[in-house]
Amino acid sequence: MIRHFVMMLAMALAGCTHQPAGPPPGPVSFTVGNPYQAGGEWRYPRVFNSYDVTGLATVYGDDAPGYTADNEPYDANALAAASPLLQLPAIVTVTNLVNGYTVDVRVNDRGPDVPGRVLEVTPRVARLLAFPSGGVVEVQVTLNVQQTATLDGALGQGPKMTAAPVAGITAQSLGPPGGVTGQAVQSLIPAQNDDANPAAVTLSGAVSVTTPAPGPLYVQIPGYGSESDAFREMERLYGVQARIVPVSGGDRTLYAVNIGPYHSVADADAGLAQVLADGATDPEIIVR
């Protein structure tokens, strides 16, 4: 009877921790993926040479996957996150705009599935950045080009960025992202040579603090090549408070329609839902 109770207790405790189901689907791989739809919002993953956005981030829940989109075991204690757009894996700096807390994480998954969200972080990252109890907060997400190029180059794929290290690249089997042990997962590290001893692409989990920069939320419809096209879209959205703002399109200026401001997540989500229902293309929630 006691033995049976101990076995049942062990099974219950095991159920409290997320465990990957079955063997890994394959080695860690450079991943972009096809366009997909989430909650009525189309997303178009691609390779970014620069990426610096603001928006809303959320936290993985109990329905987290066993494995991430680039084939790493999901670990709630990893310094990791999911992006709807970035190439995988990628290193980004995430800043909680409300308190200024900043930490580097590895993006290795697709998500979140909720429209109007730019990132989904593990519970560990949420704790480090002091996310609110509701789990949704204003963030800035900035791509670390050099570290991302190292990861992508180690996999033999990805963009050929000039910021990549000169040293040769090789793949080694090390610990999971964030230094958590217990499950095998491929980590990527520049090869050593006689001239230098480059540091591995590892994440310390150290939190730095910058000046908080919270702001009102806007629903943004980006990407118009001319101001007149953006103006026509704004006129079509009759009855909403909107303005046209220039945004960077890489090598040229684009024009976006900003709808708002909204002073709560609920109001911004309602605004996004209305814009999607009106047939707007690729709207997103930003912080300005």
Image (cartoon, rainbow, N blue to C red):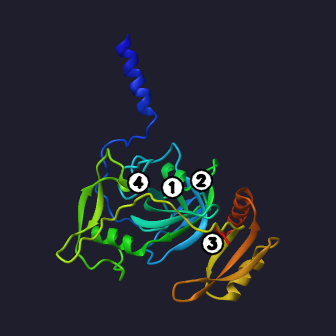
Look at discs 2 and 4 and give the one toward the viewer: 2
Number of other residues with Cα within 10 Å of mark 4, as a class: few under 14, some 14 to 19, many 20 or more: many
| CB contact under 8 Å: marks 2 and 1 | yes
The residue labelled by disc 4 is 68
Q: Position of residue 204 (x, y in %)?
A: 40, 59
The residue labelled by disc 2 is 131
60 left or right, relative to 273: left
Disc 2 to disc 4, how far (Cα)?
22 Å
Disc 1 to disc 4, how far (Cα)?
12 Å
The residue labelled by disc 3 is 281
Q: Is residue 34 visible?
A: no
Number of other residues with Cα within 10 Å of mark 3, as a class: few under 14, some 14 to 19, many 20 or more: some
Q: Earlier in the sequence, mark 3 or mark 1?
A: 1
Q: Position of residue 150 (x, y in %)?
A: 33, 71
Q: Which corner quadrant holds the C terminus? A: bottom right
Badge 3 marks a residue whose secondary structure is loop
Badge 1 marks a residue whose secondary structure is strand
Look at discs 2 and 1 and give the one toward the viewer: 2
9 left or right, relative to 130: left
Which quadrant of the view contains residue 105? bottom left
Q: Amino acid at mark 2?
A: Phe
| 56 vs 19: above or below | below
| CB contact under 8 Å: marks 3 and 1 | no
Q: Earlier in the sequence, mark 2 or mark 4?
A: 4
The residue labelled by disc 1 is 121
